[in-house]
Amino acid sequence: MRDTITQGVAGASHIIKPDTEKETEPSVHRGAAAVINGTERTFLDKYSDYFWFALLVLSGIGSAAAWLRRYLNRDEPDDNTSCRNRVLAAISDVRNAESEHDLLKCQSDVDAIVGETLKSYDDGAIEQEDLTAFGLVLELFNHAVAERRATLQSGPPDQTKTAPTLASRR
């Protein structure tokens, strides 16, 4: 039958008889051989060292950036404390104010301090906790202004009245 096929098909003469001996191994794809032998490496097996190294480097860069930011802003907490102290000083000025004009001047000074503080918060130099503490001082300032304004509007204090004591307020 081989001869008839060779006459009809031009390339059929190159067909060879397969090896039928049992001692020969069949040819196996190298990927299939890797799976069978257990030596197949996945993408993560091949590149996991690079991933860990990249995570280590990025973590180091992040830590260095945080340190540098903290180093460059090391004087900022003192500035935050000084802003609070300036508002506390303004509170004592408010309590000693002699006129509405003095109160308005103290309020404009505190408005400028609030502007500085909010700018520092926007820049990330002030933490949320520091801003909360500043808010408490600012609330104290607003109460002092309201009390002093009420005192100034009621007129000069009457010397014949005695000041209420703590026991009489209870």
Image: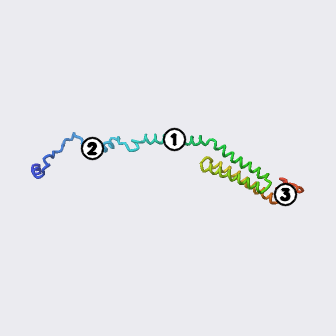
Q: Measured from the top left, where is residue 153 in percent x and y?
A: 80, 60
Residue 160 is drawn in which quadrant?
bottom right
Q: Nearer the viewer, residue 52 or 148?
A: 148
Q: Measured from the top left, where is residue 75 in percent x and y?
A: 64, 42
Query: Of tags 1 and 2, which is closer to the observer?
Result: 1
Query: Are the residues tagged 1 and 2 within 8 Å (C-beta)?
Result: no
The residue pinned by badge 1 equals 61
**Residue at the far bottom in the pictured view:** 154
Mark seen at residue 28:
2
Q: Distance of mark 1 from mark 2, alpha carbons?
A: 48 Å
Q: Nearer the viewer, residue 90 or 135?
A: 90
Residue at image position (69%, 53%) is: 111
Residue 37 is drawn in which quadrant?
top left
Q: Distance of mark 3 from mark 1, alpha carbons?
A: 65 Å
The residue pinned by badge 3 equals 156
Query: Of tags 3 and 2, which is closer to the observer?
Result: 3
Q: Of label 3 and label 1, which has the lower sequence position?
A: 1
Q: Could you tell me which quadrant the C terminus lies in?
A: bottom right
Q: Nearer the viewer, residue 88 or 6?
A: 88
- Please, what is the three-letter code of the amino acid marked with disc 1? Ile
Q: Of label 3 and label 2, which has the lower sequence position?
A: 2
- Please, what is the three-letter code of the amino acid marked with disc 2? Val
* Mark 3 burial class by Cα count in 10 Å: few <14, some 14-19, many 20+: few
Q: Nearer the viewer, residue 56 or 2?
A: 56
Give above or below for 161 relative to 75.
below
Q: Of label 1 and label 2, which has the lower sequence position?
A: 2
Mark seen at residue 94:
none
Query: Are the residues tagged 3 and 1 within 8 Å (C-beta)?
Result: no
- Please, what is the three-letter code of the amino acid marked with disc 3? Pro
